[in-house]
Amino acid sequence: MSISRRQFLKGSAIATASSALPLSLTLPSNAFAAGSDDYKALVCLFLYGGNDSFNMIMPASGTNYDNYVNARPDIHLSASEILPIPVTASGQSIGINASMPNIAQLMTDNKATAVVNVGPLLEPTNKGNIGSVKKPSNLGAHNKQQSAWQIAWNTSEYHSYGWAGMMMDLLANEAATVSESLSLSGNELLGGQNSQDLRISSDGVRAMDALGHSNAVNNNFIKLTDAPYGSAFSQEYIARLRGVIDFQAELDAVMNTFPEDDTIPASYLGGQCRMVKRMIQASEQLNHQRQVFFISLGGFDNHSNQRNLNQPGKHDSLLAQIDTALSAFYQSLEAEGLQDKVVTFTMSDFGRTIANNSNRGTDHGWGSNQLIIGGSVNGGMTYGTLPEFIANDGQDATGNKFIPSTSSEQMAATLCKWFGLSDNSVDYIFPSLNPANENPFPSRYLGFLGDATEPPVLPAKLAIAGVTASDTRVDHTPEMAVDGDDTTRWTAHGLGITYTLELSNPATLSEIKWSQQKGDIRQYFVDIAVSEDGVNYTTISNITTPGNTSALIGFPVSATNVKYVQLTCNGNNDPAGGKWVGWNNFREIEIWGN
């Protein structure tokens, strides 16, 4: 059965009891042309409260597992409570909470994956540059960070619309009977400039919510539409209301063609998944080529009694509900041959703190781990880098929070790309990911979905763990060349003076940048050498600076597995000559690579 197309508002305004029915009921004008076999759906599961995703996915063995146990003495999972899942791209051993055995199996079968240590970022951020880069505001605030996951950053502020809503604006489908954005919970993700979500429930789809929940309202509504009198304006208004009732009857007839799938559990989350399955099955009758769903589960703000050691608690129970509902949902799609056309992913306010608190719980964090499930997933590995599980002094920590190593917008852009957006459209929705930015992310996409391959990795500014110099002027110390302040500098007098930088992690170098005092009138002479161990150095470049700028200058280099960079300074050619040619300085130094 196919519903006839009506002038029916495609948005949430008509789906709430308090909304007045607008007189202008129009559909978007831009059509999205797609073949009949090109159907795709995204299902966002938002975990309200801030899921402790580092007790969902965690180190499985080795030193970092020991760090995890030490940081969380009251709530960590023992080895017997962790199931293995595919390693990260860097080969890290990783595991998932044993309350999620079905999702663990999907990961083993390459039908699911995870993105680890992901969160809202405005620029690539690490411990070395966290004081100088732009950062999201209100980190740790529930409402603001829920918005940050759902609304992309637009240069100086967040967009007015959700990233999925903007995506559906670009993929507008005039032929759709109702909005292709469908939510079972309030959200910001699906709101676009033109496209709006249709609010549905586990019980069904109502053109006007009051019609399904109040006999008195329903009876009065029908009585009003039966009134044969009034002005021309009143009659037009009544005709449109009558159209809503007729539309609801037709919509009910379509939905009744697809009964609930009782292989999906009848839990709170399972009930939402059942309704999503029905809407997916009805997509052809609804003239939908693309569908985006928003479902949710709450209860994750666990500041106390999150779990007892070696005894699952309320957090584990929530993870178990996710496991049974999402795995059954996937299997029900697989039974219909739809598994490659639907991708389910999780989002949450934020991750939790690295160390547990004194109440056997965790507090508001930053970086988090998220699940991706679908037949189009490029499985066999976990995406991202699991952070060092050490608070405060840890290389991936800011206080008691993990600094995300991957942007939540990179994760979202990967989903949008699979859904059908071009690179230009992705840049429109996610300006922070544009490779032309001054401080760009390594890539727009993460490679976990569809036929996309991991794009060439763009160089990033590398974190510097420490600096030393063989000589220094007492008030111009080595640290002043890496403090992010171009008005301070390291200075020393003499030839053959070494300035050594230790990187936080071994890296492949592509460029070294520095700025120097009086660099606009002097040429400086610097040799660049690299080392894996800080003892044995190999010279890779001999630099004579241009002498025409005191701004940051980049010098291309090429070296792999570098842990230490040593700059040997041999003075300058100051036109005044004399003692001035023996001075060396760096105002700021940056090392770039991967």
Image: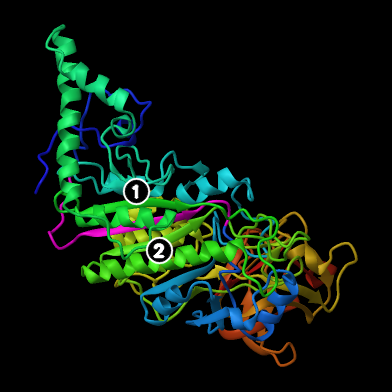
Position of residue 242 measured from the top left corner of the image (x, y, whole percent): 16, 25
Q: For the residue marked with disc 1, what is the amino acid? A: Ser
Q: Is residue 302 above or below residue 25?
A: below
> Image quarter for residue 162?
top left
Which residue in the protein does label 1 denote? 202
Residue 75, how many percent across, how many down?
Answer: 69, 69
Please give the name of the residue rendered at 37% of the width and 41% of the height, measured from the top-left corner: 191
Q: Is residue 528 left or right of residue 273?
A: right
Residue 576 showing in the rendered view: no
Amino acid on which the number 2 mark rests in the picture: Ala
Q: Is residue 540 above or below residue 544?
A: below
Q: Which mark is residue 86?
A: none
- Rounded to the nearest whole Å, what is the CA distance between mark 2 and mark 1? 14 Å
Measuring from the top left, give residue 471's x and y in whole percent: 86, 76
Q: How many marks?
A: 2
592 over 197 or under it: above or below: below
Residue under the image location 53 percent in, 61 percent down:
318
- The magenta span reads 31-50
In the image, is 315 to the left or to the right of 13? right
Q: Could you tell me what secondary structure mostly forms the magenta stretch?
A: loop
Mark found first going from the N terminus, 2 or 1? 1
Q: Which residue is mark 2?
A: 325
Quarter of the figure with residue 117: bottom right
Q: Position of residue 263 (x, y in %)?
A: 31, 66
Q: Is residue 447 left or right of residue 207?
A: right
Graded by Cα atoms within 10 Å as few (under 14), some (14 to 19) or many (20 or more), the crowding at tag 2 reads many
